[in-house]
Amino acid sequence: MEMLWRRGFRIVVVLLATIALLGGAVVAVGLWRLLTLDGNIDRIPDALPSGRMARSGDPGEVWLLVGSDLRGDSTAENWRAGESHADTIIVLHAPQGADRAHLISIPRDAWVDVPGHGPDRISNAFRRGGARLLVETVERETGVIIDHVAVIDFQGFERTTDALGGVEVHLVEPVHDPSNGWSWPAGTNRMSGEEALRFVRERKGLPSGDRDRIKRQQAFLKAMATKVSSAELRTDPVRLDAFLEAASGSLAVDEGAGMTTLRAMGARLLEVGPEGMTFLSLPISGTDWIDGKNVAYLDEAVKRDVFDALRDGSLDTYVGEYGLENDVDEVR
């Protein structure tokens, strides 16, 4: 299991597109179909801590997007405590009335204080206590209240990508994974679900290690969001329904995230569009080995400033001033 999670499946990359289309494009189907799709989505009991103070400052929504590393038969098996690690963690911030959405990736190996368990990698919070403990950990680290949480599983990644007919990613140079012998040529590559999973899980041969892996996740996420928001998909009832069926059956959310919530968030994301998405990752100040585990220390000053800026509505200014945004239009 340790080797499995270390290799990792970067499967959270379909979550944003799933939420966007489930929310913004379901108006193209009838009410009966909408109710069926809503019934497909798993609800995670007690995913959000109780007794929290309401968020002050920015009135927009904050979602925690989680990718599990377990090869389960259903999404429900991937959020139980003890079943899997949170291999991918993204804080999605959608400011109210703004023309931007922010996606902040937290490295899975980040060494943090897990409430009730002490210092550990942040990915282990999900294994130890499921979505609720991971939310508590992220809130403690960021000082930001999480409104909703969404989880996607391994099979959901492939199924949802294939339902779109594949997703195109542009590479600036040929890519070769020496550990598996997988290769992609330079230029535009249309990837099936299986190929995409290979691409976003590669861990060897990347110059900047986990930072490059995160950038690949984000590049694929933007490419999928572009495909989802295209008129080509939304005007094809058969393909649209196939995608909605695959996406809704691959998603688990907190009990407070009903279809009305998904539609509202989806409408906002579709209005923002792929070009309005700002991607960044929390920088690492150093790494170490603790109890045989490779851990990463977050740059505490930058982390504090990023989430201070998120709370007071100045994140765009801060990211632009310090050049923190990841360019995901072309990747290696």
Image (tube, helix red, strand yellow):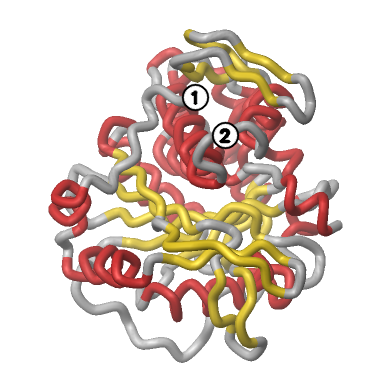
User: Image height check: is 292 above or below 73?
Assistant: below
Q: Nearer the viewer, mark 2 or mark 1?
A: 2
| In this rendering, position of residue 195 left or right of residue 325 | right
SS type, badge 1: loop
User: Image height check: is 223 above or below 189?
Assistant: below
Which one is in front, 45 or 58? 58
Give the image location of residue 50, x and y in percent: 51, 86
Which one is in front, 123 or 254? 123
Give the image location of residue 272, x and y in percent: 27, 38
Which one is in front, 316 or 24? 316
Q: Callout 2 environment at 10 Å: few (<14), some (14 to 19), or many (20+)? A: some
Q: Callout 1 environment at 10 Å: few (<14), some (14 to 19), or many (20+)? A: some
User: What mark, if any, has residue 206 been given in the picture?
Assistant: 2
Amino acid marked by disc 1: Arg
Q: CA distance from mark 2 to mark 1?
A: 8 Å
| In this rendering, position of residue 258 left or right of residue 101 | right
Residue at x-position 19% and y-position 74%: 57
Residue at x-position 66% and y-position 67%: 289
Q: Is residue 39 visible?
A: yes
Amino acid marked by disc 2: Leu
Residue under numbered circle 1: 332
Q: Are marks 2 and 1 in contact (CB under 8 Å)?
A: yes
Query: Splitting the image into 4 quarters, where does residue 204 fall?
Result: top right
